[in-house]
Amino acid sequence: MRTKLLTWILWGLVIILLFFLPKLVNLYYLSLFLGFVIYSLYAVTLNLLLGYMGVLSFGHAMFFGTGAYTVALLLKHIQGIPLLPTILLGGLAAGLLAVILSPLLVRVSGTAFAMLTLAFSQLIFVAALKFREVTGGEDGIGLASLPPLKLLGLFSVDMNDKINFYYFAIIFVALCLFLLWFYTKTPFGSLIVGVRDNALRMDYLGFNLSHIRAINLIVSGTFAGLAGATHGMLMKLVSTVGVLDIGTCFKPLMMAYIGGVGSFFGPILGSGILHILEDVVIRFTDRIGLVNGTIFVLVVLFAPQGLIGLFNTVKAKWFQKEKVS
């Protein structure tokens, strides 16, 4: 009971901090924080494959980029399109891509899955580079302005205002994270973990492994597309370098490993650490990739379960020591 009360108090403090954050920091740090929040959602969607289904994806950026480009193209070519349908269509497009690829991807695992996702991601990356007439190539697609947020015709909120967009993005991403957390706690979430831990037994029990893997891939791809759509609106620029390049593929992977693959909140912690680290390192050197790689190697060597796993191990040993004494 006491633990539950402390948890509710902690979440209440977090909500209060998020509400007053625009009054406490300038626009630069507000944008940095939004980047952390959006990449947290992106990293969690990758963790649905890596941590919950046990397959490593090297090409998750294809879903992230599909969502971002869908939003950019819709806003560029359809005047007056509402904000929420635009973002949801970005997620829908990424989910449709997952539907198209799932018949191939669900039949493989291990190295084959990782290489196939990387191949498809690079194929989409090259296609986006070559079709300059549609995607803008390396220059990308700039978003001059965002449509206002309208709900049931009751009110209209200007999303070009950074503070308004902050509140919208925080609420939207928080809702997506809650839905994904709830998804992992459902009986179907248990099936995904069962496929990861003992696929042969799940097959003997009569479950269709391909269907389970396909549904999880579609859910992961759809929410990665929603993250990409929100990221495109935040940056107001969608280009291949930033939403489809190899760095965008590996960034959520590093976040998941650093925070802890076996935990739902691990990738969120990893996203926060990487964003803070990059903001500090860029003040002294431009070798951010070298620093990130070093941190990643150290975590893999000395904390293979991530920082949350390391914390749980230390906590278990501490309580065990207290019981003995």
Image (tube, grey):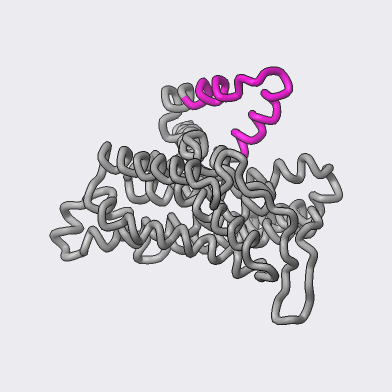
| Residue 79 visible in the displayed image | yes
Task: Determine the residue located farthest toward the front in the rendered image.
Answer: 133
**Which residue appears at 40% of the width and 57% of the height?**
97
Q: Residue at x 82, y 50 (%)?
A: 22
User: Which residue in the rendered view is the most extreme toward the left?
Assistant: 204
Q: Position of residue 141 (x, y in %)?
A: 63, 49
Q: Quadrant of the N terminus?
A: bottom right
Residue 205's x, y, as percent? Answer: 16, 63
- Residue 319 visible in rendering: no
Nearer the observer, 217 or 52: 217
Magenta portion: prevailing SS class = helix
Can you say whether 35 is above or below 304 in the image? below
Residue 133 horizontal/vertical position (percent): 55, 50
Residue 159 against residue 310 in the figure, above or below: below
User: Is 216 placed left or right of 88 in the picture?
Assistant: left
User: Furthest-right residue in view?
Assistant: 23
Total number of numbered labels?
Answer: 0
On whether residue 240 falls in the magenta region, the answer is: no
In magenta stretch: residue 280: yes
Residue in view at x 55 percent, y 24 percent: 289
Q: Return the residue nearer the eye: 113 or 253.
A: 113
Q: Residue at x 29, y 61 (%)?
A: 212
Q: Position of residue 312 (x, y in %)?
A: 48, 38
Q: Quadrant of residue 113?
A: top left
Depicted 23 relative to depicted 269: above or below:
below
Task: Magenta stretch: give its range.
Answer: 272-296
